[in-house]
Amino acid sequence: MSAAIDIGSITCITMILAVLFKPQIKVKRFFIDTYWPIALMGALLLVVFKSISFKEIAQGLTADTAINPIKILVLFISMTVLSIFLDEVGFFQYLANATLKKAKSSQFMLFTYLYMTVSVLTIFTSNDIIVLTFTPFICYFAKNANISAIPYLVAQFVAANTWSLMLVIGNPTNIYLATSYGISFIEYTKVMLLPTIAAGLTAFLVLWLLFRNQLKKEINPSIEHIKIADRPSLIIGLIHLGLCTVILVLSSYIKIEMWPVSLAFAISLFVCITISKLIQKKKLTLLASCIKRAPWQLIPFVISMFIIVLALDKYKVTDNIAGFFGIGNVTYKYGLSSFLTANLINNIPMSVLYSSIAENLPATLVNKGVYGSIIGSNIGAFLTPVGALAGIMWTSILKKHEIKYTFLDFIKYGVIISVPTILASLFILDIVLK
């Protein structure tokens, strides 16, 4: 038991230190993220010190249950690939440019339109992809217009990690926690609709109060004209994402799990685009870029963290944590503690851990614990850069564009925005689940 706790703790601490101070290492021509090899090493050490056996790991990974991490990873990566494809054909950049045009000379309207655009997109696509696509665009635009990029950057990062709560496909943590408890697409949306709206409106109000003085100045930027060069591919991509979302909505009624649906549409997209490009006698560079950008590093990361939690679960560590939480004020205890824990160990490991902790709750309280943890995992992403992997990538993009946004700046804005946002969201969630 002691070895499992020690190895798990050291792995998480080392991983966070690496994410903060050495997020990548260069091996020849390639850059490798440091967080997943550390998690993998931690999982291997548990086997070496006999805290868990290969047989127990195999049973956990092959179990025909909702908590199977393989199914969860297939669902997340498939949905992310659909989003990456739309990004590769220039869809998100086109929408960002259209947003800038519509705002004209008003910074407040630009701020509002940007928040709304990111919010809508992040509901139906990957919030990480939206953040990574819009950030460089905002940096270039702000420099060109001679205005501060900070209000817009903070707004889009907050919007992407708040409105991602609405649908189960909005965030890998939603997918992991919800599917671990067999929560269907429809059931999830019914519960999270009002808490998401409460969180989104609260976040926008706080953002406006924070930046209202900076947004008073009028702008006169030169906006470049952006066209979608490959319209057939865009149409194919939008059809696949739209139909996939519809089938996911209906999956609980037609008795199909979500992961094979998303996988089938990802495969179908690749087949359709391959045929389209062969007919046009063009190269398959679009698909190659999608494969290259897919978050494959999450496979060893999530599986390694799953193994660590399996070991902790074996020695009743998660039971003890659940006992410490008790069964009173479950929504707030799980929501706020997951919000803080995500910023100690990152929101993906936190979700794996909390999926196990919530198993100890009485059946009548499980939903409060699970949904509370989901809210904590999303909103925790903008408390500190540690909260989500997108936060680390986001700050690195800002450095490349020479935009000063320190760790303390992140925490300053994070505390001011995230605390009222999570409290509003948990308050509404508690009412919905009563």
Image (cartoon, grey):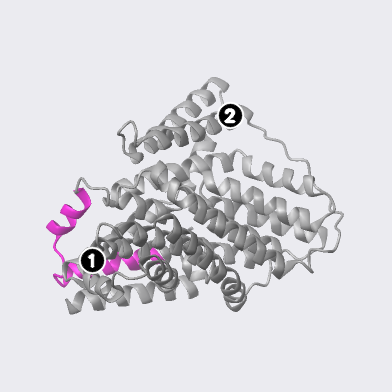
Q: Is residue 12 left or right of residue 422?
A: left
Image position, residue 255 (x, y; %): 30, 34
Label 1: which residue? 44
Which residue is nearer to you in this view: 416 or 403? 416
Q: Residue at x 38, y 55 (%)?
A: 298
Does residue 58 show up magenta in the picture? yes
**SS under mark 1:** helix
In the picture, which quadrant includes the C terminus? bottom left
Residue 32 in view (yes/no): no
Q: Say which amino acid is labelled 1.
A: Leu
Query: What's the residue at 33%, 71% (across, down)?
Result: 328
Q: Quadrant of residue 40?
A: bottom left
Mark 2 is on which residue type?
Answer: Ile
Q: Is residue 334 above or below residue 366?
A: below
- Residue 9 against residue 331 in the figure, above or below: below
Which mark is first along the chain, 2 or 1?
Answer: 1
Residue that carries the numbered disc 2 in the rendered image: 235
